[in-house]
Amino acid sequence: MASNFADPYIFSSDTLPSDPRFLPPLANGQLGWRVFEKIMHMGGVYNGEGGACHRADIPCPLAVWMSTEEEGKHTYSLDTHAGIFTHTILTSYVEASQLFYAHRQFPNLMVMEVLLQRQMTTEEPITVMLDSSFTPHSDDITFQTAPDYKGGRHIFGKTMFPEVPGVPCPSVHLIWSPLTSTVTLLPDQHQSHWSFLLAIAESRENAESSFDTGLELMEHGNLQSSHSKAWAELWLGSRVELEGLVHLNRALIGCMFYLLSAFPSLSETPIQFGGVSPGGLSNGGQGQDYWGHVFWDQDLWIYPNIALFHPKLARAVLDYRMRTLEGAKANAQKQGYKGLKFPWESAISGYEVCAVNIYGQQEIHINGAVILAFQNYLYLTQDLAVFTEGYGSEVVWCIADYWVSRVTWNPDDQQYHIKGVMPPDEYYYNVDNSVYTNSVAKYSLQFAVELANLLQHPAPSEWQEVADKLKIPFDPELKYHPEFDGYKRGSQVKQADTVLLGYPLGLPMSREVRQNDLECYESVTDPLGPAMTWSVFAVGWLELGEAEKAQQLLQKCFKNIQGPFQVWSESSDGSGAVNFLTGMGGFLQAVLFGYTGFRVQRDCLMFAPLLPDDVAVLSVKGVSYLGNKMDWLVKKQEISVVVRKQAEDSGIDKPSPLEIVLTRSGNIIPLIPGQLVMFPKQPGKIQKQNSKSYCWFL
């Protein structure tokens, strides 16, 4: 295999992965497809009731293999600059290129292009074969044929079973350019080009409109350029690069590319976003990759990376949760509690679709992850519309009601307990007082009180009372946090759990306790556990100033990266979910919140950069804070920050003037748009100019 090390954004190889699960996925927040595969998926289109619900397999008309009569040299390249996968065959007489992309601006479009370039002067026609594996059949959708539309083939159908009884099944319409079995370069042509469109939507009108858009773009020669321009806009607003380790830099770029691919367009009219599943839109058929369901992975592991750069995309996640309110209410009522209980596994309705009952019943920490996402968005943007015009406040306050109804008062220790849960560490269930669950419940309640005060809404006294008196397990003799009541120190754990107290929760604790937690659980964590775990340990050691220890743990993640296209597997042996966005999200957080020390607080963005020895420079461009876009350059001894003159994707109408407050020197540095500031590397914070805590609440 080969790779293009001259450009870290291009992943190239002369062979395809032996395991087709690691073919590169192409997605745009609405459509997802693994190149060359027969099936694809569409956001929000599921088949099956309840626990049988899974992403509906949709046949892909672009499942085409290109070949030449003469044996040639094959190369395969994923250009993440533009989100284009290219298969090239070079022979003595022709260079044939086959390009695929999920259109970044117009999310109902997928495209295949074929380009032939003559390599020698001949008077012979040159023919290239296009072998299609497409059949208009699905095990999940009963298709019918419709009349052709403007030269395009058209089939449509509905899924066979609704997610919830009595709810209409989703419809799917496909319109695509007819495929030919060959394309030919005529004797008088040096090169020629063909484009094949695929439009997919839930209605005939939208499918036809999308196909029309594609035809118009083709007519004006803007089909590929409009797609590449949209990707350029995304990268302009969210770029993470470093100098020193080529493989680490490429891994970061790959993670950012696949995460961005899971989200909708920045500029097109918003789609009804279907959330982010652990394996993304390209995966999730029946029995695969968690069936395409949405977990806490979206809110805790993936979301923070996107929210730091793109408030509009972050808002799409919150909108998804708000659209599933009614299902979450039903889940809580079914369990006998008040408020909202977001499903452990979610599709479109918000009703629990986990096939194994105990997970849906006991992994209630999902509620806390949802609240952390809403809180993070508010602190980064100060955009209150999601709470005053949307249903954000209802989400926050109803989750607080759930926690109050879920706790039990214990007269012996005069504390509230939460009994019978499964913690993030799924090796245990029906435990009492999971330290992570209780901690995230406490923070959910505190944020509910904070939001109520901000919106001048009366907060029930029980919210604060339960928050103040909720048990947080701690062993004063061993000075560490047991994972739950009765946890035996040294027992194996599946994944990051207690270590999440330090980050992202930020539970106050001494350096000694933080270190004890890290050391205790690092030694007993299953080495084949899910990929995001070691990233959290890395963040913890960076907090303690142990950059080399952190780097050793971060290196473990590379076992989950399956070359050559930087596709992650859930487990280090290649098993589990593929295109594992959860692992990528954790890995990115280790850099975006570990190397930088970024912490999103109520009234500031804190930073405390620390780079390991083998990383010379870290560049983070497009950090979005209070309507501003900032570019950061972190070196061993120096930090540079510039606020861009014009803020893209700000989330609020007018950016707030910012200043830097340095911790050691006490210096205050105004950030004037367009003017670069540099200062010696040290901790500090970004805040509104002349701000005081809570001043923006007034």
Image (cartoon, rainbow, N blue to C red):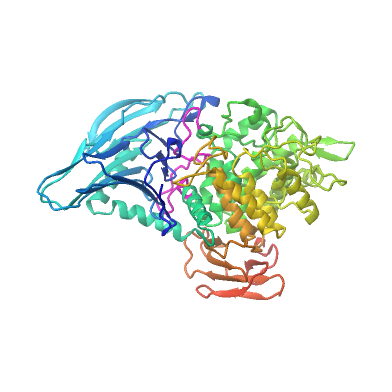
66 shown above or below 539: above
Q: Is residue 456 visible?
A: no
Residue 157 in picture, x, y percent from top left: 35, 28
Query: Is residue 250 rendered to the left or right of residue 661?
Result: left
Q: Quadrant of residue 169?
A: top left
Q: Is residue 568 visible?
A: yes
Vertical position of residue 652 compared to residue 144: above or below: below
Residue 570 on the magenta span: no
Residue placed farthest to the right in the image?
412
Q: State the image coordinates of residue 596 (x, y, percent, origin top left).
A: 62, 61
The chief SS type of the magenta part is: loop
Residue name at image x 59 percent, y 45 percent: 299
Quadrant placement of the C terminus: bottom right
Q: Quadrant of residue 640?
A: bottom right
**Numbered disc total:** 0
278 within the magenta span = yes
Residue 67 figure quarter: top left
Task: Give the residues in magenta.
Answer: 260-288
Does 489 sit left or right of 66 as displayed? right
Q: Position of residue 412 (x, y in %)?
A: 90, 36
Q: Nearer the viewer, residue 135 or 115?
A: 115
Horizontal side, residue 63 vs residue 284: left or right:
left
Identify which residue, 693 or 512, lies in the foreground. Answer: 512
For the residue pair 430 and 556, the one nearer the viewer reads as 556
Q: Is residue 287 left or right of residue 128?
A: right
| Residue 673 % position (x, y) | 52, 72
